[in-house]
Image: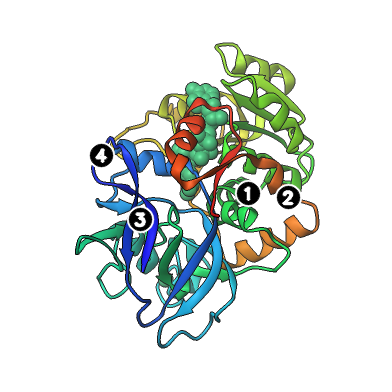
Amino acid sequence: MKTMAVTLDSVGGPVQVESLDLGEPLEGEVLVKMGAAGICHSDQHAISGQHGAELPCVLGHEGAGEVVAIGPEVNTIRLGDRVALNWVPSCGLCFYCIRDQKHLCSEGTQRIWNGYLADGTSRISRNGEPILHYCGISTWSEHMVVAEVSCRPIPDSVPFEVAALIGCGVATGVGAALHRGQISEGDIVVVVGAGGVGLSAVMGARMAGAERIIAVDREPEKHRLSIDLGATDFIPANDATIDAVLSLTEGRGADVVIEAIGNTRLQQEWLAAVRPGGTMVLVGVPSTSDLTNFVSADLIRSEKTIKGSYYAATGTDKAIDDLCAAYLDGDLPVDRLISKRVPIENIQEAIDSMLTGTEGRTVITFE
Ligand SMILES: NC(=O)c1ccc[n+]([C@@H]2O[C@H](COP(=O)([O-])OP(=O)(O)OC[C@H]3O[C@@H](n4cnc5c(N)ncnc54)[C@H](O)[C@@H]3O)[C@@H](O)[C@H]2O)c1
Ligand SMILES: [Zn+2]
Ligand SMILES: [Zn+2]
């Protein structure tokens, strides 16, 4: 069959919208008709070469849709299921899976980066030449063949656009707040970078009962959205921002600071705003070649902890279930994070508007 999709042929772009050939789902695979797909900054990192993806590929790693065909030996997903897509499916058997760290699954992690489905081949092609599956799910496409294990069924009442964002940005931001920040009731939390991931960390901090949630962004338009999603304060990013946080916390610093941009200079500077005994969570991802340089004595004498946070920071399938339930209970207003909807033909406009920093999340709608 044919599918309209967004391809990246070389680092630096441009991305192209084109009609590609899509093979039938093989053993353990299903065909998903995409209902919605999100634009995450990690797609931009693939375009800029900051994260190195195998190319050419179909981009996109936030998506949800309906299963419209199933291959042989598919046991857990049925025709007609509405599913969110998970970019680190877990094998259930490896060192990490049996220790309840399924998001670090060695098999799932390896699969994301090589661009092939489990049998080592691709279902996507152009003039007979294979095109790779970015993160194993390539959601910027009207249809896509994915592994059954990449699909998590969602309730009928969760819109596809909400489930798509739960599939990366929301799971990542909430996971950083709950599982790595381990935010508790009454905590003071700072979230640096109020994009899709940072605003999701704000929602996570609110779910955890933080008393004060301070969002920081260089884009003043993020003020309204930050407060709308649960921040108690918004401080524009400038040279005085860290001092402003210190003065809001009697000079101590925050219990938890979450860096959701991926800038090593900011990660270093913001350690000064973590209180002694507090935690800094790094969830924004710098270039894979960037080095960092924290003041070691500050970490030791002040017992500050720095933690990385990857994807849902817990098993992603369960996280998708929990986040869908929280959305339906009214505790996770993901729909308010969506600030723009575009058809797939306008993908470049969607990427450009993410780069301005003014959007919450932009979603690609299909039909
Ligand atoms: N750890 C993970 O598993 C994981 C998963 C998804 C995304 N990410 C990463 O999280 C980061 C954020 O992703 P996103 O989709 O939310 O991006 P985004 O583009 O939606 O948001 C980034 C925000 O940071 C702000 N910003 C940029 N530079 C700034 C600066 N110097 N000072 C203050 N604010 C600044 C922008 O205005 C924008 O609001 C990216 O690095 C992305 O790759 C990590
Ligand atoms: Zn992402
Ligand atoms: Zn595993």
Nearer to the camera, 271 or 85: 85
Q: Quadrant of residue 290?
A: top left
Circles 4 and 2 in contact, beta carbons < 8 Å: no
Q: Which mark is residue 11?
A: 4
Ranked by sequence position, the earlier of labels 4 and 1 is: 4
Identify the mark nearer the N-term, 2 or 1: 1
Mark 1: give few (<14), some (14-19) or many (20+) Cα within 10 Å.
Answer: many
- Which tag, 3 or 2, sits closer to the chain's start? 3
**Residue at 42 percent of width and 64 percent of height:** 144
Residue 120 visible (yes or no): yes
* Secondary element at tag 1: helix
Q: Give me the disc on residue 174.
A: 1
Q: Are marks 3 and 2 in contact (CB under 8 Å)?
A: no
The image's colour scheme reads: rainbow
User: How many neighbours does mark 2 have within 10 angstroms: few (below 14), some (14-19), or many (20 or more)?
Assistant: many
Tell me the residue that label 3 is attached to. 134
